Each structure stands twice: as C-alpha cells, then as structure tokens.
Image (cartoon, helix red, strand yellow):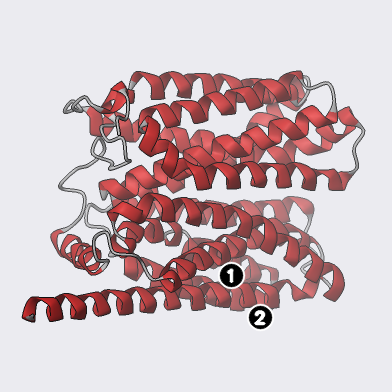
Amino acid sequence: MSAGPDTTATAPATAPRSLATLSLAGFVALGLPDGMWGTAWPTMRHTFHEQVGALGVLLVAVTAGALVTSLATALLIRRAGVGMVLTGAAVLGGVAAALLVSASTWPMVVVAAFFVGTAAGILDTGLNVVVAMSGRVRLLNLLHGSYGVGTALGPLVVTVAVLVSSWRPAYGFLLVVEVLMAAGWWSTRSSWNGARGSGQGLARADEVPAEQGRALEDESARAGGSRPMPRLVVAAAITTFFTYTGFEVSAGQWAATYLRGPAELSAGTAGAAVFAYWACLTAVRFAVAVPRATPPPVLLVRVGCATSVVGALVVWWGPSPGVTIGGLCLIGGGLAPVYPALVTLTPHRVGLDRAHRVIGWQVAAAGVGGAAVSAVAGLVLQHDGLRSFGPFLVASGSLMLVASVALELLARSAGASRTVRRGRRAVR
C-alpha cells in the first residue's frame, strides 16, 4: 500500500536531531491544554453560567475524543504516513483552540473539548509509536518529561490571560502554538521516513546500549514475528496502562483536597505540594534521559512501580504534613519512568507488526484509566471521608504493581513457549 509522498524520501543526516526537537515541542503542546482546563474553569464557567461540576463534562468529552483517535491512529499511520498524521493532529488542535476562543454557547465548548481530545489521542499515540519503534529510550523519557513541562506552563498561560482580560486569550495562545506545530510537522513530513511508523527518521544506532539492545532483541525474537500474540499478554498490557494512569492522576488530582482537609494545610502550601508531585515526575523523566546508557526498561518498571507503592504507604502513614508531601514526591518520582519504559518494551513483547495497534490500545486505556480511577477516588473520598485518600492510593498502586508483574511474567511465558515450538520444528 502506498503511503503517499511524505514517506518515501531518505531522511537527511540532521533529521534525527531536528525531528527529536520537534517531537519534544509536540509533547509540550500536548500538555498545555491539560494544564489549562482547571485554571481556566473558575472564570470560564461564569461566562457560560455553568455549575462547578460541569467541568466533568469537558473532561469526559476530552477522554472520549482521545479514546476514538488513539484506537484509530495506527491505521491512519499505515495509510497516510507519520508526517501527515501528526500534521492532522495539530490542525485538529488548532480547530479546537479556535472554537474555544470564539465559543458563544456551552455546546461549542463541549465540542471543542472533544476536538482537543481527538488531537491529543493522535499526537500521543503517534509519537509514542514512532519513538518506541525507533528504539530511542532516552527520547521517550524526554518526550514524557516535556509533557510535564506543558502541563506546568498551561496554568501560567491562563493566569496571565485572566489578569490581562479573560480566559479566551489563553486559548488564542494555544491556537498559535498549534499552527506553528502544524507548519513544523508539514515541513518535515518527508523526513519521517516510514509510512508504518517504523521510526526510521528518528533512529540512532548509538541510543541503546549493547547489553540492553541484545536483551530487547531477544525479547522481540520471543514475540514470534507475525504469530498471533496471546490475548492474556495484550490484556495485561492494557490493564497495566489503565491502572498506572489511574494511580498517577488520582494522586495528583486529589492531593490538594486531602492536604487542605485532614492535613490542615493552607491553599498555597497544598498547591505547592501538588506542584512538587508533578515536578518530581517531570524531573525524574528528564534525569533518566540524561545518561547515554539508560537503565533497562524492565528494571525501570520494576523499581518505579515498587517505589511508588512505598510512597503511597508513606502518604497513608503520614505522621506529619512534611512526611505526607515527601510520600507524594516519592510516588511522582517512582512513577516517572514507568510509562515510557512500558511503551519502549511493547514492540519487543508483541512484535513490530503488532506494536502500532497495541500501543494505541495502551494509550486509550491510559486515558480511560486516568478519568475512571480518579472518578472512583472521588466517590470513595465522598463516601468514606478524606482520610481514605492514603488507603485508596495504596490499593490503586498495588493493582498497578500486580498488573505490571503479571504482564512481565506472561510476556516471558509467551516468549518461552514460542522458543520451544521453534525448537521442535527445527528438530523435525
């Protein structure tokens, strides 16, 4: 199948660095709207005369849009090529920002939120697929660190806009960013080099250490080429992403409510604590990407999941506000490398031919998990009281840990069974 003119040219020597820089900028742009909703909402809801809880409608719309496109991105990449798909994501993001700037009715805002989600689903899935297939583990950590930069900048952009006039100029700024990103994706479309998201345009042979590369090649070989992947492995992968993101978002979203309640902290201190949580998550992702020889992804998942559960136990214990905040930072720092490492492992666990679809399913599961588990956390806190925050974190973190261990064991078992079958055929 022809992928169009944007995928046939050979990437120039400078392409890996320029494409990597553009990808990092894309993830900053991805994080911007996620960081803007909550800060813009107090003034936005008055514009449309909506209740405080109506913010949930927008978040559901964003999640629905991301779910639809996350599941379809792999097919889009195969048919149109990476460059065109990323350009389309920026165009959709620009349409969403333009709708928000000009919205005169509440339904227009909801539609705009849906388009924000569709753009995010394409960009998130597309870049995760391309970078994972390129084998650049460091770049994958930098990508997700850049997302954290975007979520931190979003509130600042909205705050400045509100102080100057209203919330609308903030989305005007987002519109400019999306237009610039669309121009960048379009101008580099011929350099992405790989209609099926092979990541050739980003690939660098010196990215993965030799020992780690051999381990990943062995795991990829065990995935069995084009053979059907056991459903339990895919189910475990999807469950791991669902529980991981649910744990991460719940900790960040409800921490301020808990700290201002049972911990009796001021609004400013609680806000600083939540910032510290996200800052630790972002900083550790960048820190993992600094050394040229990054730790093996399997080790990052093991240590990260275990560390975050220890952090949840510290929050539950919480003899003082300072210890509780330290526990939150431990959760954020522990979770930081897990998502990028899981994405990195996907092509090697399910095979290159299936990685596009499975990564799309994983990103979709992450979006649903972030919304669903956080909503369940709200119901639990409302029913059992704010002191149930710590136990809920321990429970959700433990589910994530169990899911990640099950995924690793099932992937190993599937690889071992394929090796045995190949050996039997060789004997025959």
Disc 1 residue crowd, few under 14, some 14–19, many 20+, Cα 10 Å: many
Q: Please tell me whether mark 1 sits on a helix, a strand or a loop.
A: helix
Q: Who is closer to the viewer here, 295 or 179?
A: 179
- Separation of marks 2 and 1 at Cα, in angstroms: 9 Å
**Residue 1: where, in percent of width, then height?**
30, 34
Residue type at mark 2 is Trp
Q: Mark 1 points at which residue?
A: 327
x and y, in percent, of residue 61 in the image: 71, 42
Q: Are discs 2 and 1 less than 8 Å apart at CB?
A: yes
Point out residue 282 in the picture as x, y percentages from the top left corner.
Answer: 48, 51
Residue wearing tag 2: 317
Q: Along the line of sight, which residue is nearer the eye, 324 or 284?
A: 284
Residue 385: quadrant of the picture: bottom right
Left or right position of 25 against 19: right
Q: From the viewer's perspective, tell me whether residue 369 is left or right of residue 350.
A: right
Q: Which amino acid does label 1 sit on?
A: Gly
